[in-house]
Amino acid sequence: MALDFKFPDVGEGIHEGVIVGWLVKAGDPIAMDQPFVKVETDKAVVDLPAPRAGVILALHASKGDTIHVGDVLATFGEAGETSPAGSSPPAEGSPLALGFDGPSVPPAPEAATPQASSHAPQGKPMATPHTRAYARKLGVDLAVCVATGKNGRVTDEDVDRAAARSEAPAPQVLQPHQGTQAPLAAETTEEGPVEKVAVSHLRKVIAKAMSLSAHTSAHVTHVDEADVTDLVAAYARIKAHVEKDGTTRFSLMPLFIKAAVAVLKVHPLFNASFLEADGQLVMKKYYHIGVAVDTPEGLIVPVVRDADKKDMVTLAREVADLAARARERRLTLQELRGASFTLTNIGAIGGLMATPLIHQPELAICGLFAIKDKPAVVGGQVVPRKLMNVSITFDHRIIDGAQGARFMRDLVELLEHPELLMARM
């Protein structure tokens, strides 16, 4: 008997994805749990496994299509069985022709006017809690949105289109392969020539997250300077010892993670989240630290879980592994969610300071900046020291400026006196 496989609910807050590529074509035999499609959802590219063995009777979407939870992706059956009426497989060709590494099949242009679902209900519009909150932040009435989701549900994209409805529609463009932003359309404006590019799915996810953060939290950034001369010296000794086996690359990040966890235990509000609708704080008793990773396609924040329970060598290996797989887009959804606090290291690139945006629903994010040789006064003498700026951006709705200053004071103390950090590990 034929089985329609629907895009599953892959986790809290994930209600849509984009088809990156098919690994099969209609008529192919398939084994139980064999990956059959690559889907980009949130910030991960995941392989979906077949729910049963048999034959692929039909594929119901093309590469580049946006799919929502509950949409039928493929029909599975037995050899000789026919696909149910109404199935419409994508364009013919091998898996590569529709898939990860092959030529792109152009999706419908995003600028095209969406068609409302025939299942659109009367009365109160249907939408997920996330979409309702997003609409409130943008000041959009769900009733004016053209619902394109399953069974007449309003999606985030429907809200975006309603918010931008007064703007002129964009010209038709082809979606670029993967996360690239290749030139797609050229035109001449009154000011001069321009090129328009299609924004990748990942960049759209990042843009939505940043807009939500900016509209949600009252961001305040407190910056201090830390003399990390002794920390760098201790790090050099640890690095030489840890890397002797040639299998581990030891960076400064484990030291920063350990320092952050120690301070979070003293200032638990920075490890919490705020349920505005319920008027409640969620005081987290775990320390899952997000570590922002700069990738060619955009910023990705994998999560080091239970950082307080791991030694620095374990942390070094885990951070290196997560960062490498983040750049290759091989992280699982579980590895991208659940952080209680985030560290972002801007120092590897340079700069004196920045104002990072809080990773929702967290209440704070710590920025780490470049370590530089500078003159400093020590014991009445001007001597060369290694100095760095450190910032804490916090949600002023919940955390006061004095609390932010105390958090930073305690963090700087640990960074300046690594022996205290070791004593608290």
Image (cartoon, helix red, strand yellow):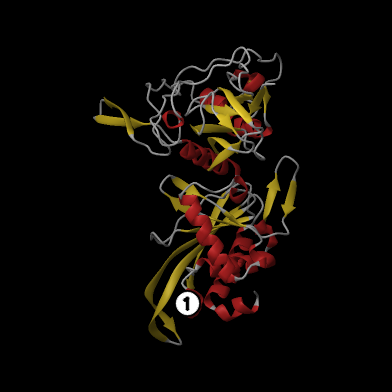
The quadrant the C terminus occupies is: bottom right
Where is residue 323? Give x, y as percent: 49, 56
Question: Quick one: 353 or 293, which is closer to the camera?
Answer: 293
The residue that appears at 60% across and 13% down in the rendered structure is 86
User: In the rendering, at what x and y percent does residue 44 appear?
Assistant: 54, 43
Based on the displayed image, in which of its 4 quarters is residue 392 positioned? bottom right
From the viewer's perspective, tell me whether residue 282 is left or right of residue 254: right
**Camera-side residue of 140 and 332:** 332
- Vertical order, 83 against 286 (above or below): above
What residue is disc 1 on?
244
Question: Is residue 32 visible to us here?
Answer: yes
**Left or right of 54, for residue 292:** left
Relative height, residue 386 to residue 326 (above, below):
below
Residue 169 placement, left or right of 76: left
Residue type highlighted by circle 1: Lys
Give the residue drawn at x 55%, y 49%: 331
- Quadrant where the N terminus lies? top right
Residue lying at 50% horizontally and 79% vertically, measured from the top left: 241
Residue lying at 51% horizontally and 75% vertically, measured from the top left: 242
Q: Residue 326 in the image: x percent, y percent?
A: 50, 51
**Secondary structure at numbered mark 1:** helix
Question: With respect to residue 78, does 210 lie above or below?
Answer: below
Which picture quadrant has residue 167?
A: top left
Label 1 environment density (alpha carbons within 10 Å; few <14, some 14–19, many ≥20): few
Counting from the top left corner in percent of width and height, residue 247 is at 49, 69
